[in-house]
Structures are given as structure tokens and as C-alpha cells.
């Protein structure tokens, strides 16, 4: 928020929203970078989002704030990425992921992985939502209670696990469409596609 109460939406990144893990940390990191400092805004066309916020890249002297929040692990890239700064933002995200910083921190003692992602359903995605899916694998030697876990993407579509226990050394397929949950398949219940065919990020 600027001195004139203008709200700025940082271009190219998504940060945790209120209620999400790392929201407080991300908010503090942003405050540390920009509060009571002179910032330079680099807006682009369109200059505002649907909520009326100014869309811009943000700089404090030579520091690229959008990039720094990603580098610290308190934001991730937003797709589709514009050409400007694309490589810098993706490089920062890769570094944060490799160092397991912030939102990329590994769940301690949890050997769970995304074993497969199938974003491009056969035919038209919107007409075949159950052929869009991800496969979640429990690589532990014990059952894993996923109740209350969430799966989300870069656009903040979010799936909340119901009461569900994934057996040891087993996998479950999370399908985008509507269906009846079983031990091996669960259904998001979405009325539209979730995963981008040209690339996306999965958060658990």
C-alpha cells in the first residue's frame, strides 16, 4: 500500500494469502523490503487488475522486490509469465526450491511425492475433467494421514483433503472432476480445469 492508499499488485508473483502457511512471514518479509522506503514502480499494460489494484514490478534502489520475495521462498512465479524478467524470476524460484526456503520447506519426516501429473486431458479439457489428474505417492513404510492437507496450484485453486489415510507405499490419484472417492482415487469436484497444460506448480 502506497502513501496515497493506492494498492499495488506485484506482477509475476503469487504470495501466501491470509490463512495460508507462511502468510505472516511473507507479509513481514515484504514489509522489511519496502516499508518507509522510496520505491520505484514499473507498471505494465494492463495497468490494473479486476480489483482495481495497480499492477507493477517493484524496485527499492537496485533491489528487485518481486524477485527477492521469490528468492526468500515467500512467493512463487505466477503463470503465464510475461517476457520481461521471466528468466530472473524462474531462476530465483529454482534457487528457493533447491534450498527448501519458506513455502518450499520440506515437511519434516514426510516422504510424500507427486509421482505424476497429467494436466492435458484427452480431447477438450473442460469436457473430460476426470482425465486431468495428479498422482500422490506415500513412500513411507507407514500409513500417512492426509486429512486436512491441501493441494493447490499457482492460481490458488485449492483442494482440502477429507478424512483420508494413504496406505504405506501406496498412491492415490486426485482427479479434477466429479466422482466417488475410493482408496486409490479421489475427486476434486471442480467444474473447470485446474492444471495449466503449459506448466504449473503443485503445492501440498
Image: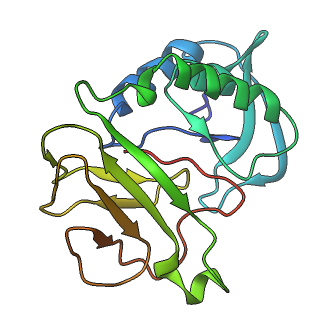
State left or right for residue 177 relative to residue 108. right
**Please, is residue 49 above or below residue 101 in the view?**
below
Look at the image and tell me in which quarter the C terminus lies. top left
* Res. 161 in view: yes
- Closer to us: 78 or 121: 121
Can residue 6 be spotted in the picture?
no
Query: In the figure, 54 relative to 119: above or below?
Result: above
Residue in the picture at 44% in, 73% down: 176
- Which residue is located at x 54 percent, y 20 percent? 98
Residue 197 location in percent, x, y?
68, 63
| Quadrant location, the N terminus | top right
Q: Residue furthest bottom?
A: 127
Q: Is residue 75 left or right of residue 125?
A: left
Image point (53%, 25%), residue name: 97
Q: Quadrant of residue 177?
A: bottom left
- 104 shown above or below 80: above
Viewer-nearest residue: 59 or 185? 185
Q: How is the image coloured?
A: rainbow
Q: Position of residue 135 (x, y in %)?
A: 41, 58
Amino acid at each position: 500500500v502506497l502513501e496515497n492508499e493506492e494498492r499495488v499488485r506485484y506482477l509475476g508473483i503469487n504470495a501466501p494469502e491470509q490463512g495460508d502457511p507462511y502468510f505472516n512471514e511473507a507479509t513481514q518479509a515484504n514489509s522489511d523490503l519496502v516499508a518507509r522506503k522510496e520505491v520505484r514502480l514499473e507498471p505494465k499494460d494492463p495497468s490494473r487488475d479486476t480489483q482495481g489494484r495497480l499492477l507493477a514490478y517493484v524496485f527499492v534502489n537496485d533491489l528487485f522486490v518481486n524477485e527477492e520475495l521469490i528468492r526468500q521462498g515467500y512467493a512463487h512465479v505466477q503463470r503465464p509469465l510475461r517476457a520481461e524478467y521471466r528468466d530472473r524470476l524462474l531462476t530465483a524460484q529454482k534457487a528457493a526450491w533447491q534450498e527448501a526456503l519458506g513455502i518450499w520447506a520440506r515437511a519434516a519426516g514426510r516422504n510424500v511425492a507427486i509421482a505424476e501429473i497429467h494436466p492435458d486431458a484427452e480431447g477438450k479439457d473442460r469436457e473430460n475433467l476426470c482425465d486431468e489428474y495428479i498422482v500422490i505417492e506415500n513412500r513411507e513404510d507407514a500409513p500417512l494421514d492426509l486429512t486436512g492437507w491441501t493441494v493447490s496450484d499457482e492460481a490458488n485453486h485449492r483442494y482440502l483433503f477429507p478424512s483420508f489415510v494413504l496406505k504405506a507405499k501406496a498412491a492415490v490419484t486426485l482427479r479434477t472432476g466429479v466422482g466417488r472417492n475410493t482408496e486409490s482415487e479421489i475427486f476434486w469436484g471442480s467444474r473447470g480445469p485446474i492444471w495449466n497444460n503449459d506448466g504449473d506448480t503443485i503445492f501440498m
